[in-house]
Image (tube, rainbow, N blue to C red):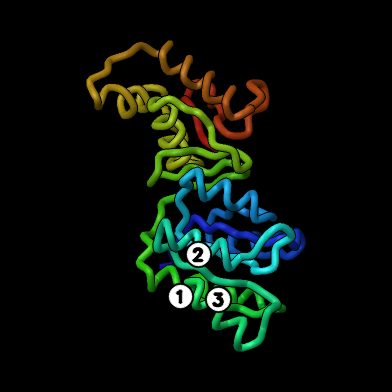
Amino acid sequence: MRTTAEIFLLEDDEMLSRGIEIALKKDGHHITHRFTFREAAADLEAGTRHDLFLLDINLPDGSGLTFCEQIRSRCAAPVIFLTADDTEEDMLSGFTAGCDDYIVKPFSLEVLRRKVDVILMRTGTEPKHIIRYRDLEIDCDRACVRLRGEQLRLTATEYRLLKYLAENRGRAVSRGTLIRDIWDIREDFIDENTLSVNIRRLRKKLGDDPKNPSYIITLFGLGYTFGK
């Protein structure tokens, strides 16, 4: 089974960065990409967790080697350099800075995918349960939801409701089932109005048009379903 991961990509070539992102998203990975040393350093300082770092060395405002050293001072997450610097001395400098692998440009995106697989398996990155639909991503391990890459601020009840519907995508889920499984199982006995209010709030946060929703669909007389 392939592991999915939070991958940090530091690459100033926008076209290459986009190609790498598309290739790795095929395997279910979530990509955070930055184009400058300054942007990357700000993320690192904020303490954002990543399972793997992919770094260019020659950046417009700094060096990936320096950034790798900063990563190593904070965590043991694996680092792969993606660079045009192809001499033996360049490679030794990369491994001295703390990288786990060194890929010389130009390179095959398929080779990169396989190297990422190998490193994630070797470092024991745990498989993640992520549900994706259109621009929506539900990270069940971290209990967070992203829409078009931006994290949504959901209440615990809204999150449970959205996750339940998404896990039952394509099925009709009755209002009674939702009330029983989201609330009554926790002995939080409610009336149907509470469900309606939570559905309405969820749709608003998802940007769903109530008259033509894309995510939470009303099945009149039956309940709800997720997705079209």
Which is more toward the observer, 184 or 40?
40
| Disc 1 + disc 2, Cβ < 8 Å | no
Q: CA distance from mark 2 to mark 3?
A: 10 Å
Q: Sequence-wise, which precedes: disc 1 or disc 3?
A: 3
Judged left or right of residue 112, residue 193 is left
Answer with left or right where residue 108 lies relative to residue 194: right
Amino acid type for the residue under numbered disc 2:
Glu
**Number of residues whose C-alpha sits closer than 10 Å to that of mark 1, classed few (under 14), some (14–19) or many (20 or more):** some
Could you say where residue 223 lies in the image, as x and y percent from the top left?
Answer: 47, 25
Whether tag 2 and tag 3 are in contact, CB under 8 A, the answer is no
- Of the pair 46 and 219, the residue shown nearer to us: 46
The residue located at (36%, 60%) in the rendering is 126
* Depicted 21 relative to depicted 105: above or below: above
For disc 2, the marked residue is 69
- Of badges 1 and 2, the one in the foreground is 2
Q: Residue at x 57, y 41 (%)?
A: 136
Q: Secondary structure at mark 2?
A: helix
The nearer-to-camera label among 1 and 3 is 3
Q: Residue at x 51, y 47 (%)?
A: 45
